[in-house]
Amino acid sequence: METVTRRHKFGGKSGVTQQNATPSVIQCQNFLFDVINAADKSSSRDSRSHFARVYEAWFPPQDAAESFFQRAYYNDVRNWWREESVQIPEEEPDAQFGYHVITLRHKLRVIWALADCGNLAQAESYVHRILVWLSRCYSGPSDARIEGWRGRLFAAIGQLGWKLQRLKICRNPECANRYFFKETQIKFCSSECASNSERLRHLERERLKIPKSRLSSAGKRKISLAQQKRWQKYRASKKKGGGKVST
Ligand SMILES: [Zn+2]
């Protein structure tokens, strides 16, 4: 038995999953967010050890002898999985997961970026690529595929395919959880990020000494007088029984 807990705002209740049971929708979502937002590289030791403990059973066992081939595959993914709107940094493998987590993260970030800019057909084709990869890797054509990790990844990627229209990237560059599902917010993952981003823009304007408005006070007064005049004209025409004002 393994315990799956949630650390960030997308989480639901803590859950328990049997070794080979299909994970719940919430567990799949938590997994996707933790991988794509790099909980394994978090500055918090708690988050890192939580990731290592909970998701050990979501990836193939790490085999150091395969490191060479995993690196080659990671490089291929970096070369062939691209989306111009997002810069995805190259990462180093770690001792527990090798290249498995960083390779999946790169794929997820490409899919998220494609969906975020409205290219849903391309995003969907990349989801299918992962499903095909899952069908083929680490077993021969006649092997029974009973590995727990494969079933979990299938479930998580299946969930991803259902959510393509909701994949968004927070516009706050300092956001810790930039990759999110759209609820009511569109550009930011939360109202905190929206207001933080406004604060950052303000600080940046201050730093660059960019005035809020380029209009002189005389210019602003001219616009204000023109607006007043137009309102007076409108009210006068309403009194006469008309409704239209020429511009
Ligand atoms: Zn955010």
Image (tube, grey):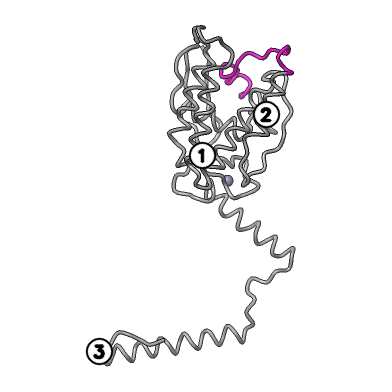
The x and y percentages for residue 210 are 70, 69
Query: Pointer 3: residues within 10 angstroms few (<14), some, or many (20+)?
Result: few
> Which type of secondary structure does the marked residue at label 1 adopt?
helix
In front: mark 1 or mark 3?
A: 1
Q: Which mark is residue 122?
A: 1
Of all residues shown, which one is farthest toward the left?
241
Left or right of residue 216, residue 111 in this image: left
Residue located 46% across and 32% down the image: 161
Would you say the magenta stretch is mainly helix, strand or loop?
A: helix
Vertical side of 175 occupied by 143: above or below: above
Label 3: which residue?
241
Query: Pointer 2: residues within 10 angstroms few (<14), some, or many (20+)?
Result: few
Q: Nearer the viewer, residue 224 or 179?
A: 179
In front: mark 2 or mark 3?
A: 2
Q: Count of labels shown?
A: 3
Image-quadrant location for residue 206: bottom right
Determine the CA span between mark 1 and mark 3.
57 Å
Sequence-earlier tag: 2 or 3: 2
Q: Start and end of the magenta stretch? A: 51-68
Is 181 contained in the magenta span? no
Label 2: which residue?
76
Image-quadrant location for residue 43: top right
The x and y percentages for residue 40 are 65, 28
Q: Amino acid at mark 1?
A: Gln
The x and y percentages for residue 224 are 51, 84
Vertical side of 166 occupied by 135: above or below: above
